[in-house]
Image (tube, rainbow, N blue to C red):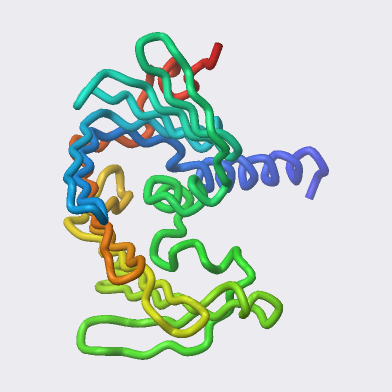
Amino acid sequence: MKSGVKFFIFLLVFISFKAFSQQHYRLRANVTIKEKNIDGKYNLTKGTLYYDLNFRKAVYDITFPEKAIIVITDSTYITIKDGKQSKTNSIRELLDFSVFNLCLTGKLDYYGLRETPFAVEKTEKQDSLVITTWVPPKKLRKKKGKIKVSTKDKKLFGVLTYDVKGNVISKQFFENYTLVKKLAVPGRVVSFIYNKNKTFTQITEFKNIEVNEKGNDNMYNYTIN
């Protein structure tokens, strides 16, 4: 086979693989977040989420209870309200383990744990659920507990996180999946965080989900002055 033909075939394969690997890169959704704090008070937040894998920014255009922009990066959590900015430190895991990032990268069904130091301890079946127990490496077992990930119909159903003593410290449940451009996205995530016999509850709903939207680049790559 001539070298030119070989190169042409290689180029086609490379382009096809690259296109497939980047098939889903952008997600927009209307978001409603309902919270019950450990003090019993309720919060309601509404807005629109913009996230693009290439920019690594989660941008929330908040419309209720008051107008604001929230930008989350790997290192910074920025709130812009009434023309004023406030910044706090963020961590990479906020984006890595977010629902929208896990969906776009194809890691949602195992909660992204294959790319971490955690390892599979066992997998078992209970009724319609497949439950996989992930354990941290020995050097982290004084700080990190195990994580149980359950799937139903090959979709992520629940995530239970434990402390080093085996107590459940958080639960997440993923519901109401919708298929958008062949991407399965949960429409509702219910989270419970336990702290000293008190529970923080958060219900996040995603509606009007758009994948690979054209336009709105100014929101996906929101510029911070």
Image height of 118 relative to 70, above or below: below
Q: Quadrant of residue 63?
A: top left
Q: Is residue 66 left or right of residue 100?
A: left
Query: Which residue in the rendered view is the most extreme toward the right?
Result: 3
- Residue sitting at x 33%, y 62%: 193
Q: Is residue 191 left or right of residue 7?
A: left
Q: Is residue 85 left or right of residue 34?
A: right
State the quadrant of the C terminus: top right
Picture coordinates of residue 202, whole percent (x, y)? 25, 52
- Residue sitting at x 52%, y 15%: 223
> Which residue occupies the foreground of this view, 104 or 174?
174
Q: Quadrant of residue 90?
A: top right
Picture coordinates of residue 135, whole percent (x, y)? 54, 80
Image height of 130 relative to 44, above or below: below
| Res. 59 in view | yes
Picture coordinates of residue 61, whole percent (x, y)? 32, 24
Picture coordinates of residue 36, whole percent (x, y)? 20, 51
- Residue sitting at x 56%, y 34%: 76
> Which residue occupies the foreground of this view, 86 or 73?
86
